[in-house]
Image (cartoon, rainbow, N blue to C red):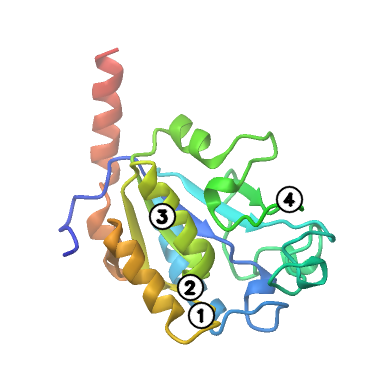
């Protein structure tokens, strides 16, 4: 499926930054190869969305010490992103603007939670509700890891009828099996996700003036 041209991202797109945490970056408990290499691109996308007055949302793994997600308790993974530990913090180079919406997932010790749509705010609001409240009409997704949480989040958004654009150069995969990330990208495409490079994002987003005019029009029609 071909990428859409300039001006075709929704007027109220949100940037969704998935799980860029210390434990998922090189040197962490479950480090994604070159996972930290995407951070400068993610930061530029965050700054762009912020300048355009568009929402920026961050998800994070936030596991208890005892959970079926971990190998020790019957799961697939070594301990990682345990609540309130250094490994669970966002990478120090990641820009998280004040007022950004942060949602946590993986708190239930009985459930594997890969999708951002299984994440909640501190007040218990889920991602779908939060996006609806913000009036979001499209998700632009970046982060870690392509073949797990990025994939699961994108597919869940598409199942809910939300248009999705993935920043191809601002994701990285685990690739437990060679080719897992490539397969994940193909699956997202088949289900309707579009892929773009982060450097072309500014041309795809509505400019600040069009957003301002749109909001005034809505206010006038109330």
Q: Quadrant of residue 174?
A: bottom right
N-term-proximal mark, 2 vs 4: 2
**Image quarter in which the N terminus is found:** bottom left
Would residue 68 be found to the left or right of residue 32 on screen?
right
Question: Across the whole image, how many numbered discs are drawn on residues?
Answer: 4
In front: mark 3 or mark 2? 3
Q: Residues within 10 Å of mark 3 (few under 14, many from 20)?
A: many
Tell me the residue that label 2 is attached to: 40
Residue at image x 30%, y 43%? 208
Pinpoint residue 65: horizontal percent, then vertical percent: 84, 61
* Looking at the image, residue 186 lies above or below residue 45: below
Give me the C-alpha separation between circle 1 and circle 3. Answer: 24 Å
Residue 149 position (above or below residue 216): below
Tag on residue 37?
1
The quarter in which the C terminus is drawn is top left
Q: Quadrant of residue 215?
A: top left
Relative to residue 126, is residue 192 depicted above or below? below
Q: Residue furthest bottom?
A: 178
User: In the visual, does 4 lie left or right of 116?
Assistant: left
- Local crowd size for mark 4, using a 10 Å CA cut-off: few (<14), some (14–19), many (≥20): many
Which residue is at 28% across, 24% downward? 216
């Amino acid at each position: 499926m071909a990428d859409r041209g300039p001006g075709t991202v929704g007027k109220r797109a949100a940037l969704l930054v998935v799980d860029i945490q210390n434990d998922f970056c090189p040197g962490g408990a479950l480090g994604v190869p070159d996972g930290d290499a995407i951070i400068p691109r993610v930061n530029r996308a965050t700054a762009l969305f912020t300048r355009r007055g568009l929402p920026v949302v961050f998800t994070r793994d936030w596991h208890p010490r005892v959970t079926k997600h971990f190998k020790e308790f019957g799961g697939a993974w070594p301990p990682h992103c345990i609540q309130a530990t250094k490994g669970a913090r966002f990478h120090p180079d990641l820009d998280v603007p004040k007022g950004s919406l942060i949602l946590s997932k993986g708190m239930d010790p009985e459930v594997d939670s890969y999708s951002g749509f299984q994440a909640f705010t501190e007040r218990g609001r889920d991602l779908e509700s939060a996006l609806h409240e913000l009036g979001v009409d499209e998700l632009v997704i970046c982060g870690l890891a392509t073949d797990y949480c990025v994939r699961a989040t994108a597919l869940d958004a598409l199942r809910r009828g939300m248009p999705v654009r993935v920043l191809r150069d601002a994701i990285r995969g685990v690739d437990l099996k060679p080719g897992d990330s490539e397969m994940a990208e193909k699956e997202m495409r088949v289900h309707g996700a579009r892929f773009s490079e982060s450097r072309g994002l500014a041309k795809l987003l509505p400019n600040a003036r069009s957003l301002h005019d749109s909001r005034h029009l809505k206010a006038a029609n109330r």
